[in-house]
Image (tube, grey):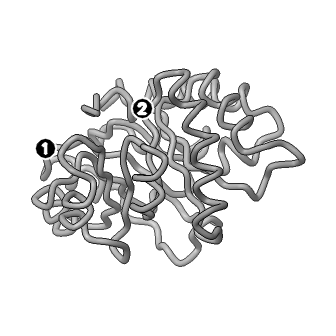
Amino acid sequence: MKLDKKQLLLYAVTDRAWLRGNSLASQVEQAVKAGVTFVQLREKGLGFDDFLSQAKAVKQITDRYGVPFVINDNVEVALACHADGVHVGQEDMQAQKTRELLGPDKIIGVSAHSVEEALAAERAGADYLGVGAAFSTSTKPEAGALPHTAFREICRAVQIPVVAIGGIQEDNIMQLAGAGLAGVAVVSAIFAQEDIPAAVKRLRSCVERMVSAC
C-alpha cells in the first residue's frame, strides 16, 4: 500500500484501557467515521491469538472505510491479519529487518527522538516517522518531552512525513504549528473520551489548522 502523506493527518493509536463495555472495534469505527485517517493497533500485553483476533476485527473496520491500518511492533500479527504495515520503536525490530520480512509494499513507521534516529530510519526504509514525546504523557511517562525545535529539525532533515505523538490534546496542538508535520498521533485524546466522535471532530479541526500553519 502506497502511503499518502494526507493519510497521516489524524493518527489514532488504540488503547483498551477505556473500553467502558464496548469492543475495541466499535470504538475504532466511531473514530474512523468521525474523521480519523490512520489507525495503529497497540497491544503490548496480549498473546498472539488474542492480538490476532483484535487485529482482524479492527482491520474489517479500516478496510470498510479505506483507512490505513498498522500493527505496533508485531510483524507476525501484521502478516497474519494482512495489515497494511507495522510501526516499530527504537527498541523493537529494526526497520531494515522489518522491511525484509514485510516486503516492499507494506507501510513501515518508525519512532524517532532525534535527527540521527530519523535519518537512520529513513535510510532503513521507513515510510513515515512518529516523533515524540511532544508533551509529557501518562501513556509513556518514561518518554521525556522533546523541545519543539526538535520537530522542525527532524522534518527538515528527512524526506518522509513526520507525525508528532505524546500528550497531544486539543488545547496544545497549535503549539506544534510551523514544524512541518504531516499530522499528529493520539491515544487518550480519542479513546479516553466519553464521546469519541465529538472528540475526533474537534481534534480533526485543530490538526487541520496546525498543518495548514506549517
Front one among 145 and 138: 138
Which residue is found at the position 62% from the left and 62% from the top? 49
Quadrant, the C terminus: top left
Badge 2 density bin: few <14, some 14–19, many ≥20, Cα 10 Å: many
Q: Indicate left or right for 155 with 204 as reference.
A: left
Please state the horizontal and vertical placement of residue 29, each as a whole percent of the image.
67, 30
Amino acid type, label 2: Leu
Question: Which mark sits nearer the N-terminus, 2 or 1?
Answer: 2
Q: Secondary structure at mark 1?
A: loop
Badge 1 density bin: few <14, some 14–19, many ≥20, Cα 10 Å: few
Please state the horizontal and vertical placement of residue 147, each as a whole percent of the image.
36, 63
Q: Indicate left or right for 29 with 65 as reference.
A: right
Question: Farthest right residue?
Answer: 21
Amino acid type, label 1: Gln
Which residue is found at the position 72% from the left and 45% from the top? 24
- The numbered dot on residue 188 is none
| Residue indicated by mark 2 | 9
Which residue is found at the position 51% from the left and 57% from the top? 166
Front one among 171 and 211: 211
Please state the horizontal and vertical placement of residue 103, each as a whole percent of the image.
21, 50
Which residue is found at the position 60% from the left and 30% from the top? 61
Residue 175 picture quarter: top left
Looking at the rendered structure, the number of numbered marks drawn on it comes to: 2
| 201, above or below 165, in the image | above
Q: Indicate left or right for 50 with 133 as reference.
A: right
Q: Secondary structure at mark 2?
A: loop
- The numbered dot on residue 159 is 1
Front one among 24 and 194: 24
Q: Could you tell me if the residues under marks 2 and 1 are in contact, i.e. CB atoms within 8 Å?
A: no
Please state the horizontal and vertical placement of residue 46, each as a whole percent of the image.
64, 68
Q: Indicate left or right for 41 with 82 as reference.
A: right
